[in-house]
Image (tube, rainbow, N blue to C red):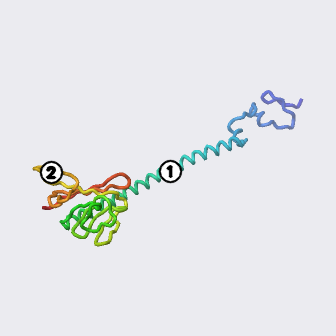
Amino acid sequence: MGARRQRGRCLRPGRLPHPHHLAGRRPALGRGAMKMRGMTLVELVVGLAVASTVAAVVLVGSAAVATQVRRGFASSGATESADAALAAMLADVRRDGEWSTCLPARGCPVYVGGAYGMALVVGRQRAWTIQDGLRLCAGRHCERVFEGATALQVLVDTDVDGGIRHDEARRGDASRARLVELRLSLRDGTSRSRWAWIPP
């Protein structure tokens, strides 16, 4: 008799209605319920595996970029050193005026140590040679100037039969050369060269 009805439900006297009854529907299992129940062990392991994979990919990518940058710096450093060595050799040739080439295996007019390949002799006491890098020999002492060089080549422009020949320097070409080009082969497989006009 004292019972009230609210939205089709019978309520006893002295009792408050349940909030769900006020809404007229049962609570649904939605996003809120999923958040409240937490993660299972399987979901946790899968999440950690995915995160580890992503971190590994990022680290490998970063290491590859760092390696490329280091190689670029090393390459640019070798290039700058080779250019500086070539500039010093050309300045030596132009300053002295008296120069020639020789092969250590066939004998050179100056001391070249244990050099191999072509040697550039400047004046009567100095020689630019290759022996574990580019070395400058003076007197009986050879000092390494540039470590990254593996071969030296001297090319000249000479007047031949009314034309100009650009070829590897030979004995006697120094006095007839109009242009000299020095070329260094580097350890990374590249080469650097510089040339200069030789005043008559």
Q: Are marks 1 and 2 in contact (CB under 8 Å)?
A: no
Residue 86 in view of the camera: no
The residue wearing badge 1 is 62
Task: Say what secondary structure mark 2 lies in.
Answer: strand
> In what element is the residue under mark 1?
helix
Q: Specify the amino acid type for callout 2.
A: Ile
Q: Tag on residue 26?
A: none
Picture quadrant of residue 148: bottom left
Sequence order check, earlier mark of 1 and 2: 1
Residue 150 in the image: x percent, y percent?
A: 35, 57
Q: Quadrant of the C terminus?
A: bottom left
Observer-nearest residue: 148 or 152? 152
User: Foreground: 70 or 44?
Assistant: 70
Disc 1 residue type (three-letter): Ser
Quarter where residue 91 is shown? bottom left
- Using the image, determine if residue 142 lies above or below residue 37: below
Q: Residues within 10 Å of mark 1 (few under 14, many from 20)?
A: few
Instruction: State which quarter of the image contains the N terminus.
Output: top right
* Identity of the residue furthest to the left in this view: 162
Q: Residues within 10 Å of mark 2 (few under 14, many from 20)?
A: few
Quarter of the rendering containing residue 5 = top right
Residue at the image point whose x is 70% and y is 41% from the top: 42
- Residue appearing at x 21%, y 56% in the figure: 169
